[in-house]
Amino acid sequence: MTDILDTPAEPTFRERHASTIRTMRLYARTFRNNGAAMIGLLIIAGFMFLVIFGPSIVPYPEDALGATHIEQKLQPPSADHWFGTDEVGNDVFTRVVIGARVSLQIGLIITGISMLIGVPLGIIAGYVGGWVEESIMRITDIFLSIPGLILAIAIVGVLGPGIGNAMLAISLVWWPGYVRLVQAKTLSLKSAIYVDAARSMGASKMRIVFVHILPNCLSPIIVKVSMDMGMAILYAASLGFLGLGAQPPFPEWGAMISVGRNYLPDWWWYSFFPGLAIFLTVLGFNLLGDGLRDILDPRGRE
Amino acid sequence: MTDAPVLEIRDYRLNFNTFDGVYHALDGVNLAVGKGQSLGIVGETGCGKSVTVRNVLGLLPSPPAEVVSGEILYNGKDMLKVTPAEMQKIRGIEIAMIFQDPMTYLNPVFTIGTQMVDVILAHQKALDKSVRKNKKQARAHAIEMLRKVHLPNPESQIDRYPHELSGGMRQRVLIAMALSGSPKLLIADEPTTALDVTIQAQILDLIAELVEDMGLSVIIITHDLGVVAKVCDNVAVMYAGQVVEYGTIEEVFGKPKHPYTEGLLKSIPHPGKPPEELYGIPGFLPNLLTPPIGCRFQDRCPKAMEICGTPPKNRNNAAHDRTVLCHLYEEGFEDA
Amino acid sequence: MLQMIGKRSILMLGMLLGLLVITFSISHIAPGDPAALAAGPDATQEMIDQVREEYGFDKPLVEQFVIYVGGIFEGDLGRSVYTTRPVAQDLMVYFPATLELVIYSILFAIILGVPMGVISAVKQNGWVDNLVRFVSSSGVGLPMFWLGLMLQLYFGLQLGWFPLGGRLDLMTDPPTTITGMYTIDALLTLKFNVFFEALHHMVLPAIALSFPALASIVRVNRAEMIETLSLDYMTNARAQGISKFRMIAAYALKNAMLPTLAIIGLRFGWMLGGTVLIESVFDWPGVGLYALQAVTASDFEPVMAVTLILGAWFMLTNFLIDIIYGILDPRVRGRA
């Protein structure tokens, strides 16, 4: 009969990392079982493929920036032009594919600026507290109580239409969301035991922020970014549709739908395909974000 | 047991299908409670005592729970096989249950009055139309029950929300709710574990009083041997999903037969004993994903023998009111 | 409760002030001479100077702000260069159209969305659940304006079931203006054919406008219901014998609605923004279309006014939702 108190044998690699291995297996299974998340992953993989390789594989690259072939205008979808052509003869398929790259850039810039403004403000608000926190959060609340698209329209309205102004306007609408998220997370982390321990050992404020707080904010930020990418693209497309964002012939999906509207219903493909592209892209980012949230923020997972 | 038991659990085996594999939670549980008697089920955390009684009222979600074999007989009827309609007539009316944490077991957005009246009204459906209560009568009955559990000022407390009451008061409310249907059997799953020690004593006294007053049979599940000794007639000791010893309080606690029971009793700190002499059962619970083939206690048992590698059998005494699951008693035993 | 309402009211007033600051600031970041912009593209230098004096553009910013706020209290929201009417007057004409559309849309989203979420949570993995999950996931990403165009194309043009735009047919006179909302005014003046026609015109725009909100509400409600159903007090309710219907529709739903309410509030805000898109697609003469036309004409006063009014409306709605939250959740009332 083994004596429990004997020194056990040297643990194997499997045993040493047993908990990490199990966690990874659980992540993988949760994600795989989440059919929706897998679809999201698939869509975004396809999207990224188009972003990276799109320009090299499109059939009519010169159409992306407004070469004109009037003689081929408004042709329905065919073998030559999978999505048909627009009013100046450009291949809609090419423009939609290039639009993917454009959309990603737009999304990245908007979320990037929003994070740049919002995350530091959120950490400062959560960590410093007091009237600093109060004032930051009040301003955030006020911004958040104006319907986003309206505020963006107002800002673009005074600055003038254009994709640059549109991105700026949307970032100004978006940053408060990050402040809220990061402030809440910082607040809860601030009272975490390990932060107390670090402070009692004499860690400086900067160190605590960068080593303990920021890394732990990452997972909700990652989830938010992946969902925001889709929303930012949607916003930009909405402004484009209203004529306030990207201006034709810039190959942005919303702007394309806006122009294509004039050619409904007979030449329906002009508006249909860019819209489908927006839908699939935003859907993909949303599903992906959901899946990431399921694994990174397991509320009642087990 | 002279009369037919109110509740009898026979050879109950239960598995859980989890992410990590099949968890063999219960392996042949045998228990019985007689009319007007109180049974205590004791054991460490994780021994399966809660799980055993959950399915009496069909409260285990299934998946992941899976009943492998066995019966839970209430007055002869197998609770594992009743229809949902029949179960509705039993819950709260024949068999009632109270739970461990009164904070999480009460709905925070309804007053306790609303919740109690809901329960009472739900019970009315099982009664004959001529004796059914309406809403007003139900509320009066609720106030009566709250008075019975010694809740001060029941007429005003009844309109309070759970978060406005203290832990002890909330547990009284849960008891009042459970007994409002005048059940024959009360199952109390760790009723005092979440409460302060002083409140614990009050609640136990209350339960004892109500048992006497209403002629209830009770099953109390706890890891606290003191609770059982105070309130119960019989006790079942569980370990790793099996009942290892069963009998009256005097017998089991006074003359324990199973080595685990002995170990448990030895580890109770005694005010007179010096601290260096504190005893603990060495070792850990077996992993029920891959349970050992023989006795589940063998790795920790000071009296383990070679035969313990094979599953032990339940041995009864002559009067069949005492059982032990241990190879030490292969040849049967007589009450010492 | 009253204390909470009081506190929230003061907070809201503060936020309204902040809103005014923001709209004021935005209108002053426009490049160029504000006086020239306000005077319009055809103004002479004389007129510009006159405008500058009249509007006080030569005064310090803070003073201008005070004048601005004062003006608003008097109902002066500026003058639209495009329509040449006072903005306030334009808003009185256009706002009810948006009000009507948004109200019908949000009601549709709630009345359809909440039950869908509940059913989907109770019968998980059934075909209803899978359909619901698909719709709710895709719905959030569906561009409102594209959906509107497609609905218009298919149901309006192809099938001819619904009109393509406008609030009423060209030949129909609108009902006497009492509220400005055609459906209500038609009912009040007993013109039932106008009522149905107005409703008919609203179907496609309302569906397009409400779809993302519907998807969101279903999603959140479903998730919350699933989580709530697994909580302890649901087990207790079951054990006490409460009927399944009441358990789901009252005990679980009341708790699950709390976060759902927050989402309804959020989505309402998106809807107020999205109304611009839908009004544009369906030629719906509301404030969204009004603001859009103003923007394309570089006419700022209307845009600011619309931002102000929609922002204020959103704040008011959030205020109401906070109060409803307090009514539903007693734990919040004490805290305020």
Image (cartoon, coloured by chain):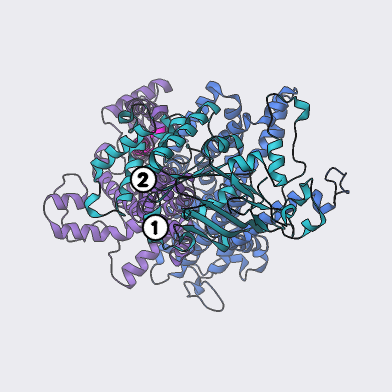
Chain colours: A blue, B cyan, C purple
Q: Residue furthest left?
A: C190
The rendered magenta stretch, by its main secondary structure, is classed as helix
Percent position of residue A161, x then y:
47, 47
Say if labels 1 and 2 share a chain.
Answer: no
- Viewer can see residue C148: no
Q: Quadrant of residue A202?
A: top right
Q: C19 above or below B313?
A: above
Residue located at (84% from left, 52% from top): A13
Q: Which residue is mark 1?
A: C116
Residue C318 among those drawn in magenta: yes
- Amino acid type for the residue under numbered disc 2: Ser
Residue located at (50% from left, 25% from top): A135
Percent position of residue B198, x then y:
52, 26
Horizontal arrangement in the rendering, residue B114 relative to residue A163 (left or right): left
Q: Which residue is mark 2?
A: B182
Percent position of residue C129, x then y:
45, 62
Q: Which residues are magenta?
A: C313-331
Q: A79 above or below A12?
A: below
The Cα atoms of the two marked residues, 1 and 2, are separated by 38 Å
Residue B155 among those drawn in magenta: no
Viewer-side residue, B117 vs B210: B210
To which chain does the residue with label 2 belong?
A: B
Percent position of residue B229, x then y:
57, 36
To which chain does the residue with label 1 belong?
A: C
- Amino acid type for the residue under numbered disc 1: Met
